[in-house]
Image (tube, rainbow, N blue to C red):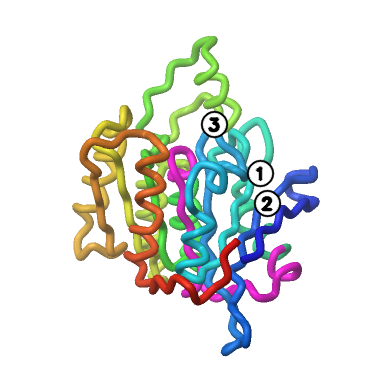
């Protein structure tokens, strides 16, 4: 397994930034020459591009399932084009895939081989990316993910209010590019392949109600066009115990085969 800390320049963000890459390394003698499936893995509001690798067994799952991980830094953006800050959504969905396809040609660029997942703010980010760009991702794994358009907003002097204004401004998010329900309905009108959605929340999550609003919305869509599945974990909350548990559940759900020993581990 190769763990690569990659420092790149982003024209979109107008700055240098870091993205972590995990590449499963097949044991010799090599039996096949193929491009790797890719999981784009997004962090939460208090995390960065190291969070998944420090706090979970994500690297081990990459080896066991033979899938590459791309773990970018979204700072406090929720992986959106910020109202007062960087264009992290454009960076994630347009610029970064182009950069990495040149630097790491073994990463598959086929839609069927690309998936996106994240927790908390990154859960919102992966749903926004997948619903806005269904041509890029075959499936979405959203853990502890609510719709920012459903979050009550109080314009006050709190840190929470400050971060919300930086990312989204101070206006109503309903029926905008930052409303997941609006994006889902827009995706349905495009009559293009839709990403499958796996959504999970801990039963003790303090924002469980926001997750359940999304659950009701997707569950009530006629014909289940997103192949939506919801899982609620008893006794777990907004914690790494829960997010680490859900990562391999998502990889199983999208049909990847776990083959411990096929790839080299550190």
Q: Which residue is mark 3?
A: 46
Q: CA distance from mark 3 to mark 2?
A: 16 Å
Circles 3, 2 touching at the beta carbon (< 8 Å): no
Badge 1 or badge 3: first in the primary sequence:
3
Q: Is residue 232 visible?
A: yes
Secondary structure type for disc 1: loop
| Residue nearest the viewer, comparing 40 with 25 | 25
Q: Which residue is mark 2?
A: 19
Q: Is residue 177 visible?
A: no
Q: CA distance from mark 1 to mark 2?
A: 16 Å
Give me the residue at 61% from left, 66% from top. 1
Instruction: Write down the region rendered in magenta.
Output: 100-124
Task: Determine if the magenta segment contains residue 190.
Answer: no
Is disc 2 surrounded by few (<14), some (14 to 19) or many (20+) residues within 10 Å? some
Q: Quadrant of the C terminus?
A: bottom right
Badge 3 or badge 2: first in the primary sequence:
2
Quarter-wise, where is residue 104 in the image?
bottom right
Task: Give how far across and how far down residue 67 sits, in percent.
Answer: 52, 68
Give me the residue at 38% from left, 46% from top. 143
Q: Which residue is mark 1?
A: 87
Circle on res. 178: none
Give me the residue at 43% from left, 68% from top. 138
Relative placement, left or right, of 31 versus 148 is: right
Secondary structure type for disc 2: strand
Is 161 located above or below residue 81 in the figure? above
Q: Nearer the viewer, mark 1 or mark 3?
A: 3
Is disc 3 surrounded by few (<14), some (14 to 19) or many (20+) residues within 10 Å? few
| Residue nearest the viewer, comparing 106 with 31 | 31
Secondary structure type for disc 3: loop
Q: Nearer the viewer, mark 1 or mark 2?
A: 2
Give me the residue at 50% from left, 73% from top. 113
Quarter-wise, where is residue 175 in the image?
top left
């Amino acid at each position: 397994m190769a763990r690569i800390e990659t420092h790149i320049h982003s024209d979109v963000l107008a700055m240098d930034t870091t993205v972590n890459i995990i590449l499963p390394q097949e044991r010799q003698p090599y039996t096949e020459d193929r491009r790797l499936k890719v999981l784009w893995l997004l962090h939460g509001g208090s995390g960065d591009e190291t969070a998944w690798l420090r706090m979970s067994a994500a690297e081990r799952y990459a080896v066991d399932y033979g899938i590459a991980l791309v773990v970018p830094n979204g700072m406090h953006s929720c992986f959106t084009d910020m109202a007062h800050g960087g264009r992290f959504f454009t960076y994630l969905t347009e610029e970064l895939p182009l950069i990495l396809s040149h630097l790491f040609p073994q990463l598959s660029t086929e839609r069927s081989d690309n998936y996106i997942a994240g927790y908390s703010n990154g859960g919102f980010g992966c749903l926004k990316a997948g619903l806005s760009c269904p041509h890029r991702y075959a499936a979405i794994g959203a853990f502890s993910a609510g719709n920012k358009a459903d979050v009550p907003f109080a314009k006050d002097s709190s840190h929470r209010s400050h971060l919300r204004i930086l990312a989204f401004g101070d206006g109503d998010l309903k029926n905008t590019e930052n409303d997941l329900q609006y994006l889902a309905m827009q995706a349905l009108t495009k009559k293009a392949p839709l990403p499958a959605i796996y959504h999970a929340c801990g039963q003790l999550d303090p924002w469980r109600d926001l997750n359940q609003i999304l659950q009701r919305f997707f569950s009530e869509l006629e014909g289940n066009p997103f192949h939506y599945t919801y899982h609620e974990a008893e006794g777990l909350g907004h914690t790494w115990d829960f997010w680490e548990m859900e990562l391999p559940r998502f990889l199983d759900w999208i049909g990847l085969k776990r083959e411990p020993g096929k790839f080299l581990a550190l």
